Structures are given as C-alpha cells and as structure tokens.
Amino acid sequence: MSGLLDELVQLSGLSPIFARTVVRRAVARAGLDPNAVQQKDVERLLPELQRALTVYLGDAGADRRATEIRRTLVG
C-alpha cells in the first residue's frame, strides 16, 4: 500500500484493518489505481471516500473525517 493510502487509512476514523478495504474500494470507485494514487488525486477520490465513510460514521462523522483529510493532505 502506498504511503498516501496509509495516511488515508489512518485519517479515516475506522479500524486500520477494516479501513484498508474501504479506502481501496473508494479509490477504485473514483476511477484511480489504488497502487498509484497520488496527493493530487485526493480531491477526486474524497467524495467516494466520504460516501463510504458515511455508512460507518454517519453523515456528521464522515463530514468531519473528509474535512480532516482535506486539511491534512490538500492544505
């Protein structure tokens, strides 16, 4: 897993073992290669990741995680 995917897993708010699958699927749904995702791709994949996180964290929790991911990885 790339360093960026590891960061997304950490920032997801989910258990790391479970988050790996959630993050990889969200990246793939965004039309990106999970093995080649780069920081410039974060804005593109974030809507898919936020949708996936909503299932587990609810709307407010997923919004908070998406905001934290954007702040940390995009600036």
Image: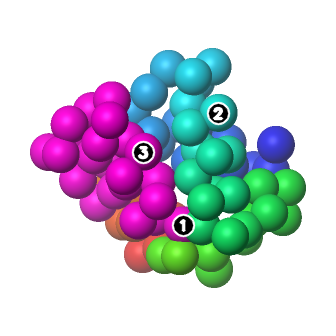
Compared to 69, does 45 lie above or below?
A: below
Residue at the location (54% across, 67% down)?
45
Label 3 CA crowd tier, 10 Å (few <14, some 14–19, many 20+) = some
Compared to 75, does 56 lie above or below?
A: above
In the picture, which quadrant includes the N terminus?
top right
Q: Secondary structure at mark 3?
A: helix
Residue at the location (29% across, 60% down)?
67
Disc 3 marks which amino acid?
Ala
Residue 36 on the magenta span: no
In the picture, which quadrant includes the C terminus?
bottom left
Q: Which residues are magenta?
A: 45-67
Residue tagged by mark 3?
Answer: 52
Q: Secondary structure at mark 1?
A: helix
Residue tagged by mark 1?
Answer: 45
Q: Quadrant of residue 56?
A: top left
Label 2 CA crowd tier, 10 Å (few <14, some 14–19, many 20+) = few
The answer to whether any part of residue 46 appears in the image is yes
Q: Which mark is residue 21?
A: 2
Residue 2 in picture, x, y percent from top left:
80, 50
Disc 2 marks which amino acid?
Thr
Magenta segment, principal secondary structure?
helix
Disc 3 to disc 1, how far (Cα)? 11 Å
